[in-house]
Image (cartoon, helix red, strand yellow):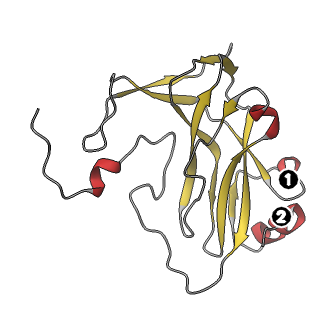
Amino acid sequence: MILTGPEIHRERDEGRLTLDPFDKEHLSTNSYDLTLGPHLLHYTGAVLDTRRPNPYQVAEIPAGGFVLQPDRIYLGSSVETVGSTHYVPLIHSRSGAARLGLYVHCTADLIDIGSLGQVTFQLRAVQPVRVYAGDLLGQVTFWHTQGEITLYDGKYQGSHGPQPSQIHQDTDVPEVVR
């Protein structure tokens, strides 16, 4: 079951979920709108590697906006810290951003129960799209769980700002010789 906007507000006030900072104007019928933070991360390597850390640069979004180019992945983050030990947050694009051909959260929309931090947006544009810090691009919904709860305590816990992939930490396979 999904929480409605008023229930998200109530559960936040009860301390059962975190949305900080919180603005009641960001509530909708069954979600909460998330704000794009001031920085974007983009990878600088020609080929991304699942077994090694990938080089990247972080850029501040200028006042005039930042143009996202097609066929690239940009990582941004929410201004808001999001999480819950009672509900599973799911991240989605707002329909207005999607109608511009902007994927705000390409995949990995599930935020593990117990995770707490700023959400990393996986931004991909179908055609060039200019974005600005403070844009309401994403939204979060909160879902009831069923069964025993094990809280997340992984490598992205406490994220602040856009986080690069840490998938290289998930394997015990020796590094490939090149």
- 87 w.r.t. 92: above or below: below
- Residue 25, position as x, y percentages in the image: 88, 47
Q: Quadrant of residue 15?
A: bottom right
Closer to the camera in the image, 4 or 27: 4
Relative placement, left or right, of 102 versus 166 is: right
**Picture residue at 51% right of the left edge, 30% below the top:** 73
Q: Quadrant of residue 170?
A: bottom left
Q: Are marks 1 and 2 in contact (CB under 8 Å)?
A: yes
Relative placement, left or right, of 107 versus 42 is: right
Relative placement, left or right, of 122 versus 136 is: left
- Residue 72, position as x, y percentages in the image: 50, 24
Q: Earlier in the sequence, mark 1 or mark 2?
A: 2
Q: Quadrant of the N terminus?
A: bottom right
Closer to the camera in the image, 86 or 49: 49
Q: Secondary structure at mark 1?
A: loop
The residue at the far bottom in this view is: 148
Alpha carbon separation for disc pair 1 and 2: 8 Å
Q: Secondary structure at mark 2?
A: helix
Q: Amino acid at mark 1?
A: Leu
Q: Amino acid at mark 2?
A: His
Q: How many labels, in total?
A: 2
Residue 27 is labelled as: 1
How many C-alpha atoms fall within 10 Å of the one at disc 1: few (<14), some, or many (≥20)? Answer: some
- Residue 102, position as x, y percentages in the image: 68, 30
Q: Which residue is mark 2?
A: 9
**Picture residue at 65% right of the left edge, 76% below the top:** 86
